[in-house]
Image (cartoon, rainbow, N blue to C red):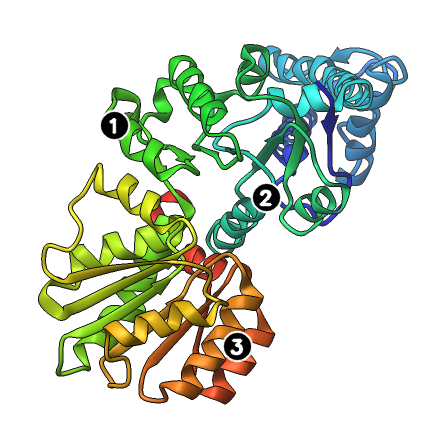
Amino acid sequence: MHSHLAAHGDMKSDSFTGRNLGWRWIAVGLLFVLGFIAFAAGVNPSQRPEAGASGLAVQAYYILGLFVVGGLDIGVPEGGPVWARALLWITYFGAPLLTASAAVEAVIRIINPRQWVLRNLRDHIVIFGSGELTISYLRMLRKQKVDTRIIIVDTHFDPIREQELQQKYGALTLVGDLTLGFLLEQLQLHRAKRALLLGDNDFQAFEAATRILGLAPNLRFRLVVHCHNLRFMRTILRTKLGRHCIIFNTYHLAALGFVRNDLIPHFRSSPLADNVVIAGFGRFGQSVLEQLQKHAGTGLSNVALIDQDAERRVMVVQEQEDLGENYRLSIFVGDISHPDVWRRLSNQLDLSGGNTTFILGTGDEHGNIRTALWLKQKYPQAAVFARSNAVSKFALAVAEEKSLNAFSITQLVENMIPDRWTS
């Protein structure tokens, strides 16, 4: 296992030295106080009998010397009451021991900095994965918890992304696999505040989740797992592991926010039952339809699905939920860029009214914005929503100019990250 430690002075979360320096400064102050009390009570070093009668500055100089050479230069405590000599003896032993411990610690940090950092972990957050989902989570986290220590683990880091994680978000990065018990033990998960598995491999994520909960049961209900496959996610949710983790899908979370905050208010403003066209029936489109069935109620009249693999995907969804109970469902197989798809759709549904909503939700950002512009020109009264993956200033500018609605999956996910995930 190889580690990468950020070495930048502006890192807020990698302030593991701060705690050690904190207690050491307290110890230094306490030793000075004990020395001053002893001198004030009449105790003097055997080689510097004038110390007790000297001013505070001279006494402070003698005490400071104890941290470097102990009492070799000024002799041993003499005179005064027994309790005062005992206090000065504590200073005699404590000062050089404190100096020695700091020196040993510095050597350990130089020889094995990763081991030192990991040993001192407490109330930290462990994240597996360094993709866009991790960046979205860190943006939300840093808005609320500036000083939370963050450990990010991945099997491989892009050098630019690793630099961003370290410098911008103050994270410590480790190359490794969370399914390995040795690494899990090093991460001090029993003292962690939360763990998030945001990688790309669903099986690996749930394997790691099982191992994490076995090693650190304190993370039960505080372990967040991202699952790419909606079908797999719905199955795992019914298991014991699913009940002990917070499992989510990016597109499912984005669709929940999209329907709740954009579509439902739009439907409520329309006096007629709505016709909804979902162009692209992948994970996002499926999640949008699922949320529409839950929240739109009888406000839907027709739902048309367009996808090159629409029939198979509809069959997969129908395995786990009933479609078309309160509305008429139409399926069109084809590419959204093909005119014949829209011709067949317009022959079956009247799309010219103000109660029509187009959702261009495919993974092709270029195709979404191009088709959205064409639809808005052809059906000016309709509401047209065009998806992009990341926040696109270009798409937002075009949407504002042409009265479209542009949205990004990244922004929807960030808006829907619950506060409890960052607490």
- Neighbour class for label 1 at 10 Å: few (<14), some, many (≥20)? few
**Residue corresponding to mark 2:** 131
Of marks 1 and 2, which one's residue comes earlier in the chain? 2
Q: Residue at x 52, y 42 (%)?
A: 148
The disc label shown at residue 396, or none: 3
**Residue corresponding to mark 1:** 243
- Which amino acid type corresponds to the residue marked 2 in the rendered image? Gly
- Neighbour class for label 3 at 10 Å: few (<14), some, many (≥20)? some
For residue 269, above or below residue 322: below
Quadrant placement of the C terminus: top left
Can residue 42 be seen in this snapshot? no
Q: Secondary structure at mark 1?
A: helix
- Neighbour class for label 2 at 10 Å: few (<14), some, many (≥20)? some
**Label 2 – label 3 distance at C-alpha:** 23 Å
Residue 47 in the image: x percent, y percent? 88, 16
- Which amino acid type corresponds to the residue marked 3 in the rendered image? Leu
